[in-house]
Image (cartoon, rainbow, N blue to C red):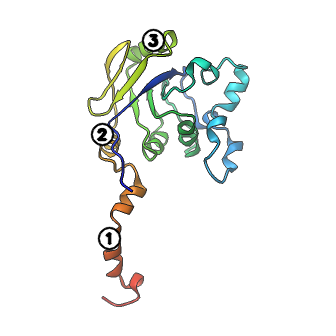
Amino acid sequence: MSASNITRVAGRGCALRGNDIDTDRIIPARFLRCVSFDGLGEHAFEDDREQAKGDHPLDDERNRGAAILVVDHNFGSGSSREHAPQALTRRGFKAFVGGSFAEIFAGNCVALGLPCVTLDDDDRSQLMDSLELDRNQEVVVDLEARTVTSRSGRMTCGVADGARQQLLGGSWDATAVLLEAGEAIEATAAKLPYVSGYAP
């Protein structure tokens, strides 16, 4: 198993307007009792969608299959639950473009190989408007170039340097990194008396 380098994500986009969308709205607390993350995608934004009575971006058939979620400021705030990005990736999203992201949410996304990039308010508003007019256009998040490209133009995006390096280099996948270092880990463990049972 080897870590995969994530340099760009391309796909149709879905605009979700509103600041301060917290993790309890992304995946309500009653769904945290699951023993695995399977099936969480169908419950993403469940309460918001119920209140919207079918008029929610995730219930719009034109957004079905969208891979990039475009949001506003402070997305993913509140509880640090990993279930939030887990639900979104199981909903089909592979990257997030926003005004700003809660730090823990963004960190949880990186651990799943999900880029979170930012656009300034004017560019983000223009992208959202464009997506709502044309749901079929492709959006490209390019981590190497630090750009977001769509029919509304090529925009410079922000991305945390540490997260960018992890995604580009493949070190975001902690399990793959550990497996690749298996021989070195075993060699180090063999030298430790409390692991091997023998004095060095």
Q: Quadrant of the C terminus?
A: bottom left
Q: Residues within 10 Å of mark 2 (few under 14, many from 20)?
A: few
Residue at coordinates 60% horizontally, 34% vertically from top-left? 26
- Which residue sits furthest top? 133
Q: Quadrant of the N terminus?
A: bottom left
- Residue bearing the label numbered 2: 161
Residue 135, percent across and down? Answer: 50, 15
At label 2, the amino acid type is: Asp
Pointer 3 with pointer 2, Cβ within 8 A: no
Please state which of residues 131 and 155 is positioned toward the viewer in this rendering.
131
Q: Answer left or right for 124 relative to 162.
A: right
Q: Kindly identify which numbered label has been placed on residue 130.
A: 3
At label 3, the amino acid type is: Ser
> For the residue labelled by badge 3, is the local secondary structure a helix, a strand or a loop?
helix
Q: Quadrant of residue 48?
A: top right
At label 1, the amino acid type is: Glu
